[in-house]
Amino acid sequence: MVFSDVVEVIKSLSTDEKREIQLLLHQYLREERREEMYANFEVAQTEEQNGELTFSSDINELRQLIED
């Protein structure tokens, strides 16, 4: 099934079914975002443990770090 087929099927659903799909999509998107954030956290945690992260409160130093 291709995307356009899915769209056509959704168009044929009742309003209640469309609302349910909307709720499910929101839930799935939240879950995916949480998983992405957790994966980023794990990478940052590993980088910190390996001494690969640099912290600073000096704006000029932060700008330099971003440019590197």
Image: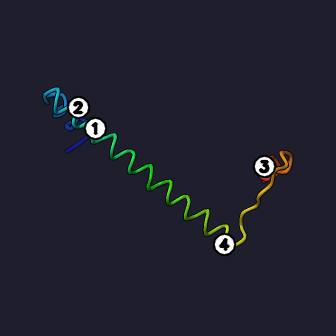
Q: Position of residue 47 (x, y in %)?
A: 65, 67
What is the crowding at mark 3: few (fewer than 14 residues within 10 Å), some, or many (at least 20)? few
Distance CA(mark 4)–CA(mark 2): 45 Å
Name the residue carrying label 3.
67
Mark 4 and mark 2 in contact? Answer it, CB < 8 Å: no
Mark 1 and mark 2 in contact? Answer it, CB < 8 Å: yes
Describe residue 26's horizontal placement relative to residue 39 as left or right. left
Name the residue carrying label 2.
19
Name the residue carrying label 4.
49
Q: Which of pointers 3 and 2 indicates the residue nearer the eye?
A: 2
Distance CA(mark 1)–CA(mark 2): 6 Å
What is the crowding at mark 1: few (fewer than 14 residues within 10 Å), some, or many (at least 20)? few
Q: Which of pointers 3 and 1 indicates the residue nearer the eye?
A: 1
Which numbered disc flags the more N-terminal residue, 4 or 1? 1
The residue type indicated by label 2 comes to Arg
What is the crowding at mark 2: few (fewer than 14 residues within 10 Å), some, or many (at least 20)? few
